[in-house]
Image (cartoon, rainbow, N blue to C red):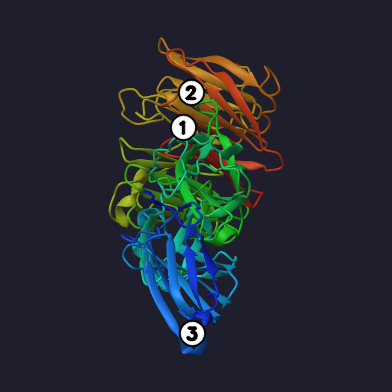
């Protein structure tokens, strides 16, 4: 934000009265009168603040009035520092001096009682009062599209540290604009503002405001949420009236590391004392020449308030900077633990969460029986919308959630109906619109003669528009048409099964993006079935079976995920491995085992996630999150990092569309872990 530097003063006007008695022979009248000799002198201070436009704050002339014995008065105007008033009656005088700018605006005033006597007696009047009342008109603006539930807290503090909360005179909160207007006594004030999105602070400022009598101080303050200003290496507070008061801030650059202590300092060549306050996003974080704080990731504004010993000598300046999470590329860094019931958020145990296409989060709480859309605010979450059964949503017994970032459709599986519910996510309003539901019947004829109690492992094959889900107690893969526009067209005539049927249900399923390859696992049978699409353009054809009896490190195999058509990642209870397709065969490649090769504990693996764009694999256990690289062209797995999750018992994870965020939920812990990925 552009700033204007101004200078304010305390003024001292020495009034030296030299009263001389006339020698003998003079008239009686002349012996009772004296001459008042004035010499105007001003001190200097510094100020950098919001100030009245086109209103100079330098005193360029002085208006002096006096009221004395027998009702006598005088009134004089001077543009110089020297002034004489002759012929004043000896006795008590009340003298008022007003300092004005070139436009005749009263800036400062002072008053003193003077007793004129035959003997000279020096008198000093201190101009210690700022004159009159002025109008303050401040507009605060922000990008309304980035704040779903805005609120403002704005206060004004005078030099005596009296604080009042301001009430908006014009409130366009929904459009991102609020105006505060009112008349206040002349002087310097601290304007402090904090913008909240829900209960989370997202922006703020601290400004020095100068009020001048009968004048308007106005300004527009932009509260930046997603754009970053260029930051100089330092700035200077300058007193334009005299010798510059140089104060330089160091330690802040345009981009800094989030979640790490950062120190900003201010140095000055002034010999006098100054009081310094630091505000980060409108919150006081320090009151010394040096300030250390730890910024969360995102955009921030740092304000410094410097105040000298003289009245109305406060100054302010601000800078904006970006704090980003630094670390090894692709390794998630924990930035926040979001607790249940924070700002109306319902997590509870056994929650499901998934990233929407615009970076917001869909949160389904089985415990609270709600579905919520939440946005990320400074490494925390705030609720945008909450849906319950009263809205016609199925909010209990949720077993899986799938978000399609291409169509913005959301599918939620439940065991209550049981069935699948289709929603459409509206990016413009961050809202869910219920489309239709399918029941739990499936089979070779519509509506089918088989029933499922619920579905898990929802997997979408975009090329065919078929959504697959695993039956929890049968070795069946249930099909649903995904892109249809009517409830009647959701059902297919087919589902995948093995003849004769396996004795155990499938525990894991994966389909490569092109559907060239697919895989199913049976944990109880330690069976991995990998398929390769042949003449039939459907998955689950041409199977090759691997079991723990003929292949090592496959005992209790469960989770599978494709990096690409030719590389399949799998996990057992405590192993992570890779199968590669080459020369028309699938071959087991490298395998990593818990507590070996320096990777730490990897017991009880619950999920795998692959990042095909970055050739990366994330492995989740209840107690840790592991990162593996699998670079092309070999795609060989290599361990990069293990992040320990003490006492959390993680159950599920999801990665954002932009691969810059990751979240975890738990079946036994009523909180959500939020990570940023450098």
Q: Are marks 1 and 3 in contact (CB under 8 Å)?
A: no
- Few, some or many C-alpha atoms within 10 Å of disc 1 (few <14, some 14-19, many ≥20)? many
Identify which residue, 376 or 32, lies in the foreground: 32
Quarter of the figure with residue 92: bottom right
Number of other residues with Cα within 10 Å of mark 3, as a class: few under 14, some 14 to 19, many 20 or more: few
Disc 1 or disc 3, which is closer to the eye?
Answer: 3
Residue ID for mark 2: 568
Q: Of all residues shown, which one is farthest toward the top?
A: 583
Query: Circles 3 and 2: CB distance less than 8 Å?
Result: no
Label 3 – label 2 distance at C-alpha: 116 Å
* Helix, strand or loop under label 3: helix
Pinpoint residue 605: horizontal percent, then vertical percent.
63, 33
**CA gap, disc 1 to disc 2?**
9 Å
Q: Nearer the viewer, mark 3 or mark 2?
A: 3
- Residue identifier under label 1: 510
Q: Secondary structure at mark 2?
A: strand
Of labels 1 and 2, earlier in sequence is: 1
Give x and y (percent) for residue 95.
Answer: 50, 76
Give whichever of discs 3 and 2 has the lower sequence position.
3
Taking the spot 68% from the left edge, 43% from the top edge, the residue there is: 648
Foreground pick, 13 / 429: 13
Q: In x, y percent, where is residue 319?
A: 45, 44
| Residue under numbered circle 3 | 29
Is residue 172 shown left or right of residue 593?
left
Q: Above or below — where is 336 with respect to 201? A: above
* Farthest front residue in view: 25
Residue contact between numbered discs 1 and 2, judged by CB atoms under 8 Å: yes
Identify which residue, 437 or 208, lies in the foreground.
Answer: 208
Callout 1 secondary element:
strand
Q: Earlier in the sequence, mark 1 or mark 3?
A: 3
């Amino acid at each position: 934000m552009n700033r204007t530097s101004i200078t304010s003063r305390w003024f001292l006007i020495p009034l030296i009265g030299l009263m001389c008695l006339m020698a003998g022979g003079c008239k009686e009248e002349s012996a009772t009168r004296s001459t008042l000799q004035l010499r105007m002198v001003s001190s200097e201070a510094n100020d950098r603040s919001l100030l009245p436009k086109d209103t100079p704050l330098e005193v360029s002339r002085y208006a002096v009035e006096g009221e004395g014995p027998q009702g006598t008065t005088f009134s004089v105007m001077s543009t110089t520092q020297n002034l004489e008033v002759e012929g004043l009656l000896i006795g008590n005088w009340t003298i008022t001096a007003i300092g004005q700018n070139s436009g005749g605006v009263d800036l400062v005033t002072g008053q003193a009682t003077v007793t004129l006597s035959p003997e000279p007696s020096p008198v000093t009047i201190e101009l210690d009062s700022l004159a009159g009342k002025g109008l303050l008109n401040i507009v605060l603006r922000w990008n309304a599209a980035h704040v779903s539930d805005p609120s403002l807290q704005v206060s004004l503090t005078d030099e005596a540290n009296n604080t009042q909360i301001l009430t908006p005179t014009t409130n366009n909160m929904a459009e991102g604009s609020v105006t505060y207007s009112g008349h206040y006594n002349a002087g310097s004030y601290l304007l402090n503002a904090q913008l909240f999105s829900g209960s989370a602070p997202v922006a703020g400022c601290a400004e020095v405001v100068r009020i001048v009598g009968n004048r308007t101080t106005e300004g527009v303050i932009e509260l930046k949420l997603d754009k970053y200003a260029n930051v100089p290496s330092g700035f200077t507070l300058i007193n334009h009236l005299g010798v510059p008061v140089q104060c330089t801030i160091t330690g802040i650059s345009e981009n800094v590391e989030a979640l790490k202590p950062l120190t900003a300092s201010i140095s000055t060549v002034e010999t006098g004392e100054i009081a310094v306050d630091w505000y980060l996003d409108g919150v006081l974080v320090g009151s010394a020449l040096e300030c250390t704080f730890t910024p969360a990731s995102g955009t921030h504004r740092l304000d410094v308030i410097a105040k000298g010993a003289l009245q109305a000598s406060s100054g302010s300046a601000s800078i904006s900077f970006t704090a980003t999470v630094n670390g090894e590329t692709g390794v998630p860094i924990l930035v926040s633990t979001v607790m249940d019931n924070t700002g109306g958020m319902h997590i509870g145990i056994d929650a499901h969460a998934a990233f929407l296409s615009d970076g917001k989060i869909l949160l389904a709480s089985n415990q609270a029986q709600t579905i919520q859309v939440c946005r990320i605010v400074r490494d925390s979450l705030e609720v945008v919308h909450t849906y319950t059964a009263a809205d016609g949503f199925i909010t209990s017994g949720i077993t899986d959630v799938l978000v399609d970032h291409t169509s913005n459709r959301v599918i939620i599986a439940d065991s209550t109906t049981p069935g699948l519910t289709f929603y459409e996510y509206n990016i413009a309003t961050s809202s869910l619109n219920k489309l239709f539901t399918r029941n739990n019947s499936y089979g070779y004829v519509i509506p089918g003669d088989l029933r499922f109690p619920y579905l898990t492992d929802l997997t979408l094959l975009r090329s065919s528009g078929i959504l697959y889900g695993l039956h929890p107690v049968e070795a069946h893969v249930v099909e649903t048409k995904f892109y249809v526009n009517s409830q009647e067209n959701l059902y297919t005539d087919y589902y995948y099964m093995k003849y004769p049927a396996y004795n155990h249900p499938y525990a894991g399923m994966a389909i490569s993006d092109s559907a060239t390859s697919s895989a199913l696992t049976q944990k109880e049978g330690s069976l991995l079935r990998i398929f390769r699409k042949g003449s039939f353009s459907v998955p689950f054809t041409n199977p090759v079976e691997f079991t723990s009896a003929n292949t090592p490190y496959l005992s209790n195999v469960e989770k599978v995920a494709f990096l690409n058509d030719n590389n399949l990642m799998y996990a057992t209870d405590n192993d992570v491995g890779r199968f590669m397709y080459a020369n028309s065969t699938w071959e087991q490649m490298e395998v990593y085992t818990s507590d070996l090769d320096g990777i730490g504990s990897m017991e009880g693996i619950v999920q795998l996630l692959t990042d095909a764009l970055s050739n990366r694999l994330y492995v989740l256990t209840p107690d840790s999150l592991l990162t593996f690289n699998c670079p092309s062209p070999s795609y060989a797995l290599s361990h990069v990092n293990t992040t320990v999750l003490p006492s959390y018992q993680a159950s599920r994870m999801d990665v954002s569309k932009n691969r810059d965020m990751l979240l975890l939920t738990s079946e036994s812990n009523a909180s959500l872990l939020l990570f940023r990925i450098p």
